[in-house]
Amino acid sequence: MGDRKVFTDVDEIIIVRNYDGLKMAFDLSANGKSDREIAIALNSEGYRTTGTHGPRPFSKDTVKNILKNRFYIGHIRDSDGDWMNAKHKSFIQPSVFEEVQRMRENRNTSRNINKARAQIYSLSGLVRCADCGNTLRSFQGKKRVRLV
């Protein structure tokens, strides 16, 4: 669980805590591991998140946020929410970051499988709850079509 010193363009030093864990997460993702599998691997190696609530185990959601964060390839958000080049150098190779994004996209789109028994009912997506405004969905329950 080593730290890594990174120099910016103006010779400032940034210490990246747990750099080996960061690299491990990106490498595992580039090799097709899921966010949950990466969280388990990081936790088993003793890595913990850092933040206002203190050190905590990684979850699939914290891993997802790390793997999608362009900060690790030398970018920061501007005032419009777009990404721009920062003063710090990349912690992760941009090619590895892009490979991770491709792997994540491929994994997400391959899950769109239609259920063989799925049915479309006439009111699906059209009816809204009078109290909360959420869309009601239709399903076959106890031999009748029901809205929930």
Image (cartoon, grey):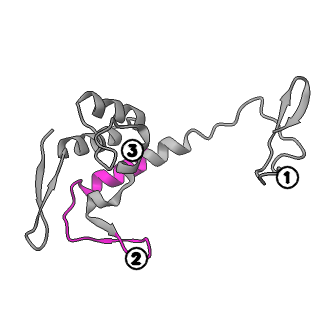
Q: What stretch is highlighted in magenta?
A: 77-103
Q: Position of residue 140 (x, y in %)?
A: 85, 30
Q: Which amino acid does label 3 sit on?
A: Thr
Whether residue 43 is situated above or below residue 9 in the rendered picture:
above
From the viewer's side, name the closer residue of 49 and 146. Answer: 49
Residue 9 in the figure: left or right of residue 131:
left
Residue 28 in the figure: left or right of residue 105:
left
Q: Which amino acid does label 2 sit on?
A: Ser
Distance Cα–Cα, label 2 vs label 1: 39 Å
- Residue that badge 2 annotates: 79
Q: Which residue lies most toward the left here?
A: 11
Q: Say which mark, if any, is on residue 130.
A: 1
Distance Cα–Cα, label 3 vs label 2: 24 Å
Distance Cα–Cα, label 3 vs label 1: 36 Å
Q: Which amino acid does label 1 sit on?
A: Ala
Q: Say whether residue 82 is magenta.
A: yes
Residue at figure coordinates x 92%, y 29% from the top left = 144
Mark before the other along the chain sequence, 3 or 1: 3
Determine the secondary structure under disc 1: loop
Residue at figure coordinates x 32%, y 37% from the top left = 56
The picture quadrant where one finds residue 58 is top left
Determine the secondary structure under disc 2: loop
